[in-house]
Image (cartoon, grey):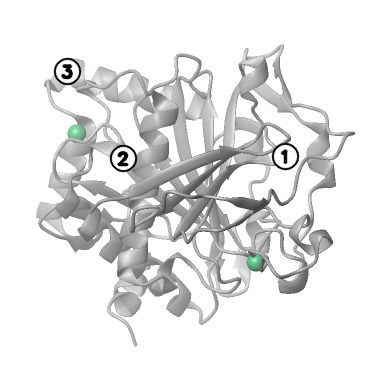
Amino acid sequence: MTLHHFSITKPDSRSVHFFSRQPFPEGRDVLHFGLTRSPDWTPPTLRVSHLTGERVSVSAARQNRPHLPNASSCPLCPASPASSPAVQASVEAPSVSFAYDWIVFENLYPALWLENQTGHCEVIVYTKAHEGSLGALPLENLEGLIEVWQHRSLHLGERDDIECVFLFENRGAEIGVTLHHPHGQIYAFNHTPPRLAAELDYAERYYAQNMTCLICDVAADHSRRGDLLLHAGEHIIVFMPEAPKFPYEVHITTRQHRTHIERLTEPEVKELAVVLKKLVAAYDRLFNFPLPYIMQHHQCPSHARGHHSFHWNIQFTPFHRSADKLKYLAGAETGMGFFVNDSLPEEKVKELRAVWEGA
Ligand SMILES: [Zn+2]
Ligand SMILES: [Zn+2]
């Protein structure tokens, strides 16, 4: 479906993108720009680890982020144009004379910054409502949100100073989220971070041996064998990996080889919306509370459009191992990157299947 896009720049140089299913009107007035950076803001810088050469973002301004504000002081809730200038200046969404469905803006507290060529960080607000989640969005809103992901991944990825685009969502205080309002994020990196680099390298070696894409083959294998499968649709496969790092880890990918989210076709987007809604709703039914998770899109570096060996996929990593216990990244995980999973995926997938179709 058609997605209309219009962008403005705030007085603090941050970009704001409006998306709508309806065409924007000719006259588009900004009545108030909303929140802008404080004068004492300092930009992030990337430093290089003396041990591995990995980059670390040093971003001291992030200490000043609001921590779990309630709805009355949430910076992601839009302000009414009739509210006081002080209220309008306290929220991110500018007050504008036109309607829109989704808003994306440059992060007020970024870990990466275009002006020093380290990258770019954006916030994608899922809905104007303070309460809710990915799983509670109406299907057509979820389809639109996926199209917003496609737009941002494509357009950020076209820049010469961006190497790869990472879409993700942190949900839940246990994961470290600082705002409850339903939203996701984008980190557009000037380099390929170590985890993705390892996945690309492994997939490249698999391709050299087999002349096929690793994730195409894994998706087909899960579809065939079925023991770790949650959904095998016409276009989309949802499964628990054979070696999950977290007890309720679930991966989503396409049957067809797709390098980037923007390469998904309209039927694939529609089926992805259905399974995202089902998965998040199933997670929330699992223990009867909104299950905290990290949702991560892993995709090819942006300029590797014809990549044959790596394939877009979403990885959901909830940190719970039971209703009242969390999986912590302790000695082996934090120290050595070596994960120990205390559960059998063949059993855990049955728990998710039991809540997959709804109450
Ligand atoms: Zn809010
Ligand atoms: Zn593939």
Q: Which three-letter amino acid code belongs to the residue tagged 3?
A: Gln
Reading the image, the residue beneath label 3 is 209
Residue 294: x, y in percent? 52, 52
Q: Is residue 294 visible?
A: yes
Marks 2 and 3: in contact by CB < 8 Å? no
Closer to the chain start, of discs 2 and 1, is 1
Q: Residues within 10 Å of mark 3 (few under 14, many from 20)?
A: few
Q: Is residue 69 left or right of residue 243?
A: right
**Residue 234 versus residue 14: which sits nearer the camera?**
14
Q: Residue at x 26, y 33 (%)?
A: 311
Q: Residue at x 72, y 39 (%)?
A: 109
Numbered tag placed on residue 109 in the rendering: 1
Reading the image, the residue beneath label 2 is 261
Observer-side mark, 3 or 2, equals 2
Ligand 1's quadrant? bottom right
Q: Is residue 62 above or below residue 69?
A: above
Give SS at disc 3.
Answer: helix
Q: Is residue 342 above or below residue 218?
A: below
